[in-house]
Amino acid sequence: MSKPFKTLDDIGDIHGRRVLVREDLNVPLKDGIVTDDTRFRATVETVTELADKGAIVLVLAHFGRPKGVPSAALSLSQLAAPYAAVLGRPVRYIDWEGADDAVATLQPGEVAVLENTRFFGGEEKNDPAVVARFAAFGDLYVNDAFSAAHRAHASTEGLARALPAYAGRAMEAELVALEKALGAPEHPVAAVVGGAKVSTKLDVLKHLVGKVDHLIIGGGMANTFLAARGVDVGKSLCEHDLTGTAEEILDAADAAGCTVHLPYDVVVAKEFRADPPTRTVNVHEVAADEMILDVGPAATEALGDVLKNCRTLVWNGPMGAFETSPFDAATVALAKTAAALTTDGSLVSVAGGGDTVAALNHAGVAGDFTFVSTAGGAFLEWMEGRDLPGVAALTR
Ligand code: ADP
Ligand code: MG
């Protein structure tokens, strides 16, 4: 299938050419130690391929939120050594001061990280002067940071217009997976939307009802939909001021031929803590002093049957308060069903969202999904059907 953007397959002979590669190196750092190197590992394929082809690889990345004010605490200098360890090759660090001279000394196949892009206040404003400053270091631009693509910054959007631009391997994998899930998916398509609140995912829900055949609503946000249908949800997390909006979404789904699945049995407790006394009840039997903390086993099994009849699944948000035992049961069970269907080859499954990734890891099935996106904000904006500026600039 031809892609609407150029990839490293189209980049040609790059021996000795300077390639600016936008990566996401925004790892958590505690007392100088990288506590989770997932983001480093996601860059390895692209950086290795470019360096092995003899390019001079100049990695561009932001770190934290310096807002144009340089500081040692947010300097990429401290990431060069741990990043080199993950890449398995030396990494030079290049400060903005004297960067032109330093870049000129680099040899084909060498990898360098330039200083924090956000030390320039104009980075986040997509300032043409900052774009020009970055562009002067490179002959070509590769964007490999999907997670930063929802921002129109100099290093994520401006550069794609200033230099010949290509998607890196991680960006390519992400875009291919997202296209399969919602762009041109095989039907029937199911979406699972869960998590705490309707208010954070209104645009996601509104977009999905026009796209998918089955909308499965779980988590705290299901309570608002149940309340809209006249169910007394007791002490549950519920945005009562949004029941009108929930009704509008249900009507829009009806009009679009999208079947909405709300839980009909639920797990409730009087206190929100690990392993409290619980009851599994029909949604109409929640007591005034109880809260809904998970989807019940009967509804979960029925939802699994919905997935069995689908070809595509996109998932954002856990079905219950999965961090607290035993309210992980529905999330784990449905995740395992989706994983098994994916392994069998009957389902394309794409999931994303910070807590969703944690939930799938907790269920032990993240590796069995077709694709799991670690991009939080960018993934949600994509689920809202928005154009991501960093992606649009590549596909122009
Ligand atoms: P993501 O980060 O994947 O987008 P969200 O941040 O929207 O997901 O939602 C995750 C949170 O929703 C979790 O902390 C989970 O405990 C909470 N949650 C899920 N179901 C319920 C519920 N029934 N009541 C309260 N909180 C819930
Ligand atoms: Mg979250």
Image: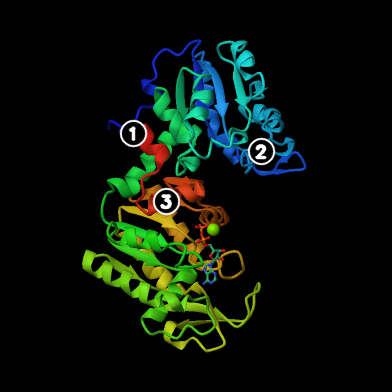
Q: Quadrant of the C terminus?
A: top left
Above or below 4: residue 164: above
- Given the current orientation, which residue lies at the most extreme right position? 31
Res. 264 in view: no
Cα separation between marks 3 and 1: 17 Å
Q: Which residue is mark 2?
A: 69
- In front of the other: 341 or 138: 138
Tell me the distance, in whole angstroms, between the alpha carbons under discs 2 and 3: 28 Å
Query: Amino acid under label 2?
Result: Val
Is 74 in front, or is 354? 74
In the rendered image, which residue does mark 3 sit on? 381
Q: Position of residue 242 (x, y in %)?
A: 42, 74
Residue 224 locus on image (x, y percent): 43, 75
Q: Residues within 10 Å of mark 3 (few under 14, many from 20)?
A: some
- Residue situated in front as seen by the camera: 310 or 23: 23
- State which quadrant residue 163 falls in: top left
